[in-house]
Image (cartoon, grey):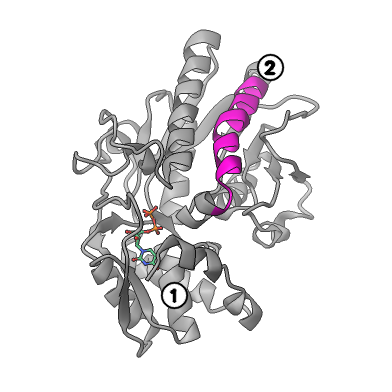
């Protein structure tokens, strides 16, 4: 039986990867320090005979006994509010954390996939973003702690690949949504749905003309799975190229939830990318992958999840951070 270590396992993406690898018959070692992850996301796996949870911060040395075949490094804060709240941890997990994972991979002879991000393209001047684009990142802006950590992570990964011959894969993840997103992490989809459910107005940052392209989590997991088991060592964009403006997105959430709230406008946060759309030609060509779930279907499934949250969860708020992030 093959064994996989998934870091960030109690997070949104990490928990879906745990499900997938368990389903595929792997022994899963799940690691998380629960700084942004939530055990609720993996509770259903805790009693599984092939699942072990380790409460550990991957920025500290990782000790695992026995053979290990695969590592998926998905531990990182991943929303702009988190970068403001825990900037040092964000930098550490992308630098010290990846160093520990790659060292472990070298020691065990394991293959590693690292979670990179469209944020490495910054506020892009090339549209859509293909993998050869170097990006436009402000190192000292509020997003810099995430963007630069992820850029460093890619460099470190390629160094271990070239110098130590470690089997590495790099997935550049574009905006992804689905069940288990944190309701109050400040990202646009949970923000809008949470507001609709609480009967609040939907907050559009800036004019709402900025664009994003949203990928449903099952599609993303399929892309990551294929990449991990492929021979592709160059970075691969995984995302859904279906691009919309944030204003259009707000309209879709209003009709999905049937809320009679309106939209209100707030300042655009510093360095908020004006547009984002993945060029997925490489993923199509080398993985035979493209998204299957369109936004209307994905949003329905995601909304069904948010409807299962308790009142307490719905009102548990990180709004102080939210206020700091986009001032009126
Ligand atoms: N956004 C918004 N209202 C919110 C939260 C986010 O208009 O309540 C905007 C945000 O400014 C950005 C887009 O939605 O332009 C996507 O934001 P998110 O934080 O989800 O992802 P990222 O900016 O990292 O792509």
Camera-nearest residue between 105 and 259: 259
For discs 1 and 2, the disc positioned in front in the rendered view: 1
Left or right of residue 266, residue 211 in this image: left
How many badges with numbers are in the image?
2
Looking at the image, residue 258 lies above or below residue 107: below
Camera-nearest residue between 11 and 46: 11
Number of other residues with Cα within 10 Å of mark 1, as a class: few under 14, some 14 to 19, many 20 or more:
many
Left or right of residue 252, residue 64 in this image: right
Q: Is mark 2 within 8 Å of ligand 1?
A: no
Left or right of residue 40, residue 306 in this image: left
Q: Which residue is mark 1?
A: 193
* Residue 112, quarter of picture: top right
- Magenta part mainly helix, strand or loop? helix
Question: Helix or strand or loop: what does disc 1 sit on?
Answer: helix
Q: Which residue is mark 2?
A: 107
Locate ligand 1 by image quadrant: bottom left
Camera-nearest residue between 171 and 21: 171
Image quadrant in which the N terminus is located: top right
Query: What residue span does the magenta drawing correspond to?
Result: 85-105
- The span from disc 1 to disc 2 (Cα, nearest Å) is 44 Å
Question: Helix or strand or loop: what does disc 2 sit on?
Answer: helix
Q: Is residue 97 magenta?
A: yes
Q: Is residue 26 magenta?
A: no
- Residue 27 location (% of width, % of height): 70, 39
- Residue 140 location (% of width, % of height): 41, 39
- Residue 55 location (% of width, % of height): 76, 45
Q: Is residue 204 visible?
A: yes
Looking at the image, residue 125 lies above or below residue 183: above
Number of other residues with Cα within 10 Å of mark 2, as a class: few under 14, some 14 to 19, many 20 or more:
few
Camera-nearest residue between 2 and 87: 87
């Amino acid at each position: 039986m093959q064994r996989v270590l998934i870091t960030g396992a109690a997070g949104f993406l990490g928990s879906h990867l745990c499900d997938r690898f368990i389903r595929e018959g792997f022994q899963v070692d799940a690691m998380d320090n629960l700084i942004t992850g939530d055990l609720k996301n993996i509770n259903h796996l805790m009693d599984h005979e092939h699942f072990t949870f380790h409460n550990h911060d991957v920025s500290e040395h990782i000790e695992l006994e026995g053979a290990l075949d695969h590592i998926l490094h998905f531990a990182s804060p991943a929303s702009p509010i988190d970068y403001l709240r825990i900037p040092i941890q964000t930098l550490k997990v992308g630098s010290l954390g990846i160093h520990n994972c790659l060292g472990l991979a070298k020691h065990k002879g394991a293959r590693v996939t690292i979670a990179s991000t469209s944020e490495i393209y910054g506020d892009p001047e090339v549209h859509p973003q293909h993998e050869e684009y170097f990006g436009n990142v402000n190192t000292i802006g509020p997003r810099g702690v995430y963007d630069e950590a992820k850029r460093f992570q890619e460099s470190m990964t390629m160094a271990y690949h070239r110098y130590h011959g470690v089997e590495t894969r790099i997935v550049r993840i574009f905006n992804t949504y689905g069940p288990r997103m944190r309701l109050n992490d400040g990202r646009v989809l949970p923000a809008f749905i949470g507001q609709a459910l609480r009967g609040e107005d939907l907050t559009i940052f800036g004019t709402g003309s900025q664009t994003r392209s949203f990928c449903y989590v099952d599609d993303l997991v399929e892309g990551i799975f294929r990449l991990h088991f492929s021979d592709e060592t160059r970075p691969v964009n995984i995302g859904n190229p279906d691009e919309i403006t944030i204003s259009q997105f707000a309209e879709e959430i209003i009709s999905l939830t049937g809320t009679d709230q309106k939209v209100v406008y707030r300042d655009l946060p510093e360095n908020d990318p004006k547009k984002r759309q993945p060029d997925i030609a490489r993923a199509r060509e080398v993985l035979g992958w493209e998204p299957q779930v369109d936004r209307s279907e994905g949003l329905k499934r995601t909304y069904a999840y948010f409807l299962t949250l308790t009142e307490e969860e719905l009102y548990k708020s990180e709004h102080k951070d939210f206020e700091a992030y986009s001032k009126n």
